[in-house]
Amino acid sequence: MKGGKRNTKCLAYVAAFIVFQTIIILVFALTVMKIKSPKVRFGTVVVENLGSSTTNTSSFDMRLVGQVAIKNTNFGHFKYDSSNVTILYGGMPVGEAVISNGRAKARKTQKFNVTVDISSDKLSGANTNFTSDVGSGFLPLSSQAKLSGKVHLLKVIKKKKSGEMSCTMTVNLQQRSIQDLKCK
């Protein structure tokens, strides 16, 4: 009889251990192994070298220096390829800059500056609001970027992910500053 109780007790311990290990693996798989896309945003944007004209033809030339933030919420680092950030006016590109390849550490936010030269010379004249926007002193711009790369988890798992940035901002031409910077 004693041997039967001992075997039952041992079997109960093994079953409890298996249940406990299953719970640990399940929690690990649902939290750590869940790979999310990184978030790409403009932190701050500063206007440099602004030149605008409202004489016969409205035009502008400026340099924007923006702080790009890549927030990686994963438990592994995000290694991304080179990409471009495009500044648009009325859906038409007016400036572009290169984001060089890099790496955002696990559960960290990587910040770096990007300089974009913007010129109204790149517009084809199709936008009828341009002259009134420059005349009003407020120029609405938007920006877009997509960073593609891989999240490296535990040096074994590599999953392709991409982070997209879509921001809107208004350039105050008199104050030479950015207003209403909003990113999605």
Image (cartoon, rainbow, N blue to C red):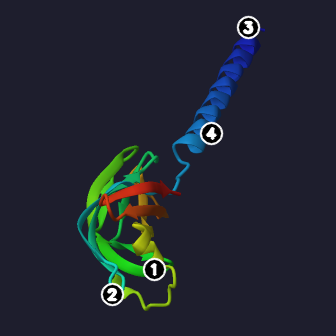
- Residue indicated by mark 2: 121
**Closer to the camera, 179 or 66?**
179
- Residue indicated by mark 3: 2
Q: Is mark 1 on a helix, strand or loop?
A: helix
| In this picture, residue 174 sits left or right of residue 166 | left
Q: Are marks 2 and 4 in contact (CB under 8 Å)?
A: no
Cα distance, mark 1 to mark 4? 56 Å
Give residue 130's mark. 1
Cα distance, mark 2 to mark 4? 57 Å
Vertical placement of residue 126 versus 161, above or below: below
* Residue extending farthest right: 1
* N-terminal label among 4 and 3: 3
Name the residue located 36 percent from the left edge and 87 percent from the top edge.
57
Q: Nearer the viewer, mark 4 or mark 3?
A: 4
- Residue indicated by mark 4: 26
Mark 1 belongs to which amino acid? Answer: Phe
